[in-house]
Image (cartoon, coloured by chain):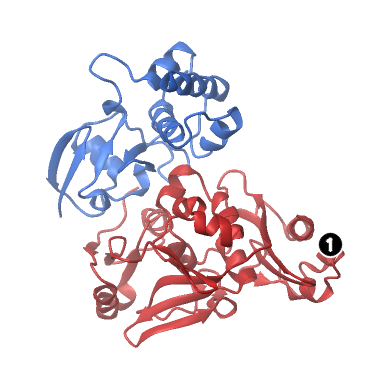
Amino acid sequence: MIPAKFDYIKASSVNEAIDLLDKHGFDAKILSGGHSLIPAMKLRLNQPEVVIDISAIPGMNTITEDGDEIVIGANCTHNEILKSDLINNELNILAQAAKTIGDIQVRNRGTIGGSLAHADPSADYPATVLACEATIVAEGKNGSRTIAAADFFQGIFTTALEDEEIITAIRFPKVANGNYQKFYQSASRFAVVGVAVVKNGDAVKVGVTGVADTPYRATAVENAYDGTSSAASHAVDGVEVMSDHFADTEYRSHLAKVYVKKALEA
Amino acid sequence: MQISTTINGKTYSHDIEPRISLAHYLREILDLTGTHIGCDTSGCGACTVNLNGMAVKSCTLLAVQADGGEITTIEGMADGNTMHPIQEAFKEHHGLQCGFCTPGMVMTAADIIKNNPNPTEEEIRHGLEGNFCRCTGYHNIVKSIQHAAEKLNS
């Protein structure tokens, strides 16, 4: 399988990449690790005329501490995230999620910015991004802005990013008590159900991926939380649950409740 | 587009189309056919090579992305006629049947052992999550990697 023809441009700065996106508009796609885009291009689900490689832009693959936040460059690979001491110590839930993605080879190439921009409804990071209330830093021709996790995911493969915007970093608050639980699709290793839980005193924040066409905060669980795992029965309240040949609506709903329970008890 | 890479210690330079995958470049242009293409969708791992010190699936990497990179393929593992200890272990412990997945298994094994010199059986099995053996010969593949790790550490 060979993609349709395209021009390849390696951007050396964020501004250059934004200018190229602005110039080529809908005909251009951003490439970082390529582990979402290249398969889609090989299947010709996506046929960009211009591919803008941002992987060599300096400063976009660092993981730093900024006060109470951890700032992760969009080009950080899953492998860099799961191996980072800073993330393991201050944001362990994200390392847990990164470890469950794909396999060694995929984790060596795939990036957090790419995964979030692609917004696959079964991707692992969105649950954690939601539960941690991270913010996505996007740069475009009008400068830089931050997008709250709750506003970022808008539908299947759809985000709040404007056409000429690029994710440059993701800002996470430090999280002391969080965990990620996942039921794997056994062939693709995507999440049939992925649940991120962040506990803070009597409060809990719950992010769910794989269950609906958009990852969501399970607010019904959060509101019903009483310190036990009984609130897990509300995992899909008000949610339109996806159905596919791996898991129909009934089974997926059941899995969501089981995995919210596991995450609350972990 | 002009790209230049170092593959198994040798420098190559070619003008190629950006849409050519690294696997395609290795096999069809450089005739390095030890790297296999199985699923061609980044699932099976038969196309695994080492790029800049890391195992990657060369079917899901454009050759232009590897520009300037240092690549090791299965052809670069042996030292002349002397097999690499991982290859030797696969031979000794029947780590292959039809052999189709073997290049990818060996390249992934090298990554596993490099990052974890004494992997447990469970760690090896997790490490091979991205490599399929359709002969289902996993038992001896895992055993081969265990023995290879021991030999490389001795």
Residue lying at the far bottom in this picture: please name it: A142
Chain containing the residue with disc 1: A
**Residue in front for this viewpoint, A207 or A197:** A197
Q: Position of residue B133 (x, y in %)?
A: 50, 29
Chain with colour red in the figure: A
- Crowd tier of the residue under label 1, counting other residues whose Cα lies within 10 Å: few below 14, some 14–19, many 20 or above: some
Above/below status of B24 relative to B143: below
Residue occupying the far top of the picture? B92
Which quadrant would residue A191 be assigned to in this image?
bottom right
Colour applied to chain B: blue
Q: Which residue is mark 1?
A: A229
Q: Please name whichever residue, A251 or B91, is drawn nearer the observer in this view of the structure.
A: B91
> In the image, what residue occupies the spot 23% across and 62% down?
A8
Quadrant in which residue A235 is drawn: bottom right
At x 21% / y 31%, what residue is drawn? B31
Amino acid carrying mark 1 in the image: Ser
Q: Left of A83 or right of it: where is A190?
A: right
Residue at x 55% of width, y 49% of height? A99
